[in-house]
Image: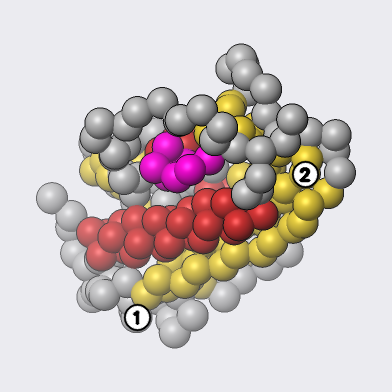
């Protein structure tokens, strides 16, 4: 059960002012109370089949994920103050869930994604950095926040020739200042940002490379 607090139903564990570098923040979350577990990732599409012959193969290289948000805590930003939502966790590190969601999205596209350790020839290589993955309280701690997901993607050919780079940012306002609404906004923003990443990659890797 989510316990109401701050008169809006959301209790934050403040970590101090981190206006310049958030990496110095430490969690003050209580350890005695079980955390509520959530996920923002969509399940893989049912009945996914191997890509047809001739599909463009893209090597997938995981880039850097925002350090403060990479683990299983849910990061919020209010001005220069960083905080994690108390008694609340992702079911796995956010970085892991996000990368799984990217793979699932590509499985439903005409592109064949090859991850590190997998065998296969590829015509392109995709690297993306998740630079923002946070709920921002732009209108104060009592208002519903806006989830911001920002990605920087770079696509190269197999010979390392640059194809292009793209910045993708999606903002999804939460319907309320409660955990379930914030998680729903993370889900929406992630799905939309990943969808744009797949669409951009598909548009720029349209021809198989011998």
Q: Is residue 11 visible?
A: no
Q: Earlier in the sequence, mark 2 or mark 1?
A: 1
The residue drawn where x is 66% and y is 38% is 208
Q: Position of residue 9 (x, y in %)?
A: 22, 67
Q: Quadrant of residue 188?
A: bottom left
**Residue 189 to residue 205: above or below:** below
Return the residue nearer the eye: 72 or 104: 104
* Disc marking residue 55: none
Q: Along the horizontal axis of the image, is 118 left or right of 189?
A: right
Q: Along the horizontal axis of the image, is 128 left or right of 79?
A: right
Mark 2 and mark 1: span between their CA atoms?
Answer: 42 Å
Q: Is residue 52 magenta?
A: no
Q: Position of residue 67 (x, y in %)?
A: 62, 45
Q: Secondary structure at mark 2?
A: strand
Q: Along the horizontal axis of the image, is 181 left or right of 17?
A: left
**Residue 131 to residue 31: above or below:** below
The residue drawn where x is 61% and y is 15% is 119
| Residue placed under numbered mark 1 in the picture | 143
Q: Position of residue 150 (x, y in %)?
A: 58, 61
Q: Residues within 10 Å of mark 1 (few under 14, many from 20)?
A: some
Q: Nearer the viewer, mark 2 or mark 1?
A: 2
| Residue placed under numbered mark 2 in the picture | 156
Q: Along the horizontal axis of the image, is 132 left or right of 162?
A: left
Q: Report the quarter where the C terminus lies.
A: top right
**Residue 5 to residue 43: above or below:** below
Bounds of the magenta segment: 105-111
Q: Looking at this view, name the residue that lies furthest to the bottom.
A: 139
Return the residue nearer the eye: 72 or 169: 169
């Amino acid at each position: 059960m989510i316990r109401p607090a701050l008169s809006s139903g959301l209790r934050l564990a403040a970590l101090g002012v981190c206006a310049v570098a958030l990496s110095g923040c430490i969690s003050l979350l209580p350890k005695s109370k079980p955390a509520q577990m959530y996920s923002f990732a969509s399940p893989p599409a049912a009945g996914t089949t191997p890509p047809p012959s001739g599909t463009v193969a893209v090597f997938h290289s995981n880039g850097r994920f925002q350090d403060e948000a990479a683990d299983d805590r849910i990061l919020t930003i209010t001005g220069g103050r960083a905080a994690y939502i108390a008694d609340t966790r992702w079911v796995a590190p956010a970085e892991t869930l996000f990368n799984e969601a990217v793979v699932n999205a590509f499985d439903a596209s005409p592109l064949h994604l090859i991850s590190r350790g997998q065998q296969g020839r590829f015509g392109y290589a995709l690297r993306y950095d998740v630079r923002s993955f946070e709920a921002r309280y732009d209108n104060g701690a009592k208002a519903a926040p806006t989830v911001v997901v920002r990605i920087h993607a770079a696509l190269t050919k197999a010979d390392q020739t640059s194809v292009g780079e793209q910045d993708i940012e999606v903002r999804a306002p939460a319907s309320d200042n409660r955990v379930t609404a914030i998680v729903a906004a993370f889900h929406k923003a992630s799905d939309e940002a990943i969808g744009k990443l797949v669409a951009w990659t598909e548009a720029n890797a349209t021809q198989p490379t011998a």
